[in-house]
């Protein structure tokens, strides 16, 4: 809600739980549910604040961006999938995305489910946080470094795949608009519905 970096919160949780538990699986089994519940509460509050309290303010910043308009159109058809991709792909920072999607047609339940896309990043943050108090020996330090490198590679790969899938969805959405615009069988009323601003419907 207060735009605090998510990574800092997850590092802190991982570090705190590492003082009570020794192995990474033990820490993850206990720290991940706590972190995820916090994410659900904080992100959902930001989502609702954006939709019902700060809507006009958020709209003034995002309505000029073509990608946000496209995302809004896709949310009505593939809300959960697009929400997950936004979490995985480096499109918006985590905190900002909560407010951006709040002014789209995304349903709260779909947003809630879509938050699972942030789990890989949360696990990585918890792992680093838990390693801060367990890096006394050379072996544990090397193990931590290797784990961090693997985690970074994995997150980059996941982000690239999600970005590729998001680009495909955006391209399909653009093709649908062009097809509706130039189709002889499409009535003027239907064309108006296709090109109607999603943000005008929310104001």
Image (spheres, rainbow, N blue to C red):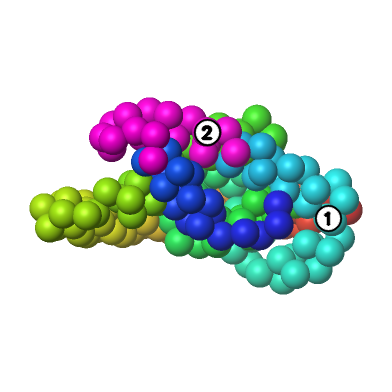
Secondary structure, magenta segment, majority class? helix
- Residue 123 in the image: state x and y as whole percent: 38, 43
118 relative to 66, above or below: above
Which residue occupies 27% across, 49% down? 134
Q: Which residues are magenta?
A: 19-38
Q: Is residue 20 magenta?
A: yes
- Residue 87 in the image: state x and y as whole percent: 49, 49
Disc 2 target residue? 34
Determine which of the numbered discs, if any, sits on residue 104 in the image. Answer: none
Q: Secondary structure at mark 1?
A: helix
- Residue 129 in the image: state x and y as whole percent: 38, 51
Q: Is residue 32 magenta?
A: yes
Task: Work out how far the residue at label 1 is from the one at label 2, CA to CA, in angstroms.
Answer: 29 Å
Binning the other alpha carbons within 10 Å of mark 1 as few (below 14), some (14 to 19) or many (20 upward) gives many
The one of 58 and 132 positioned closer to us in this rendering? 132
The one of 201 and 18 positioned closer to us in this rendering? 18
In primary-sequence order, the first of circles 1 and 2 is 2
Which residue occupies 32% across, 29% down? 26
- Residue 57 in the image: state x and y as whole percent: 84, 64
117 relative to 179, above or below: above
Q: Of tags 1 and 2, which is closer to the observer?
A: 2
Disc 1 target residue? 55
Which residue occupies 42% across, 38% down? 17
């Amino acid at each position: 809600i207060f735009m605090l970096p998510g990574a800092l919160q997850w590092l802190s949780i991982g570090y705190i739980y590492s003082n009570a538990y020794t192995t990474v699986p033990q820490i993850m089994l206990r720290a991940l549910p706590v972190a995820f519940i916090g994410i659900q509460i904080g992100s959902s509050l930001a989502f609702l604040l954006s939709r019902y309290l700060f809507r006009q303010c958020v709209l003034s910043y995002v309505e000029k961006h073509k990608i946000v308009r496209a995302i809004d159109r896709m949310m009505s058809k593939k809300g959960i999938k697009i929400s997950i991709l936004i979490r995985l792909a480096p499109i918006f920072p985590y905190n900002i995305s909560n407010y951006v999607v709040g002014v789209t047609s995304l349903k709260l339940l779909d947003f809630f489910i879509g938050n699972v896309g942030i789990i890989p990043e949360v696990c990585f943050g918890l792992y680093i946080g838990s390693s801060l108090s367990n890096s006394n020996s050379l072996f544990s330090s090397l193990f931590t470094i290797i784990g961090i490198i693997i985690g970074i590679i994995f997150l980059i790969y996941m982000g690239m795949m999600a970005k590729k899938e998001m680009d495909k969805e955006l391209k399909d959405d653009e093709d649908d608009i062009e097809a509706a615009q130039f189709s002889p069988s499409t009535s003027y009323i239907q064309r108006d519905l296709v090109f109607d601003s999603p943000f005008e419907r929310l104001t």
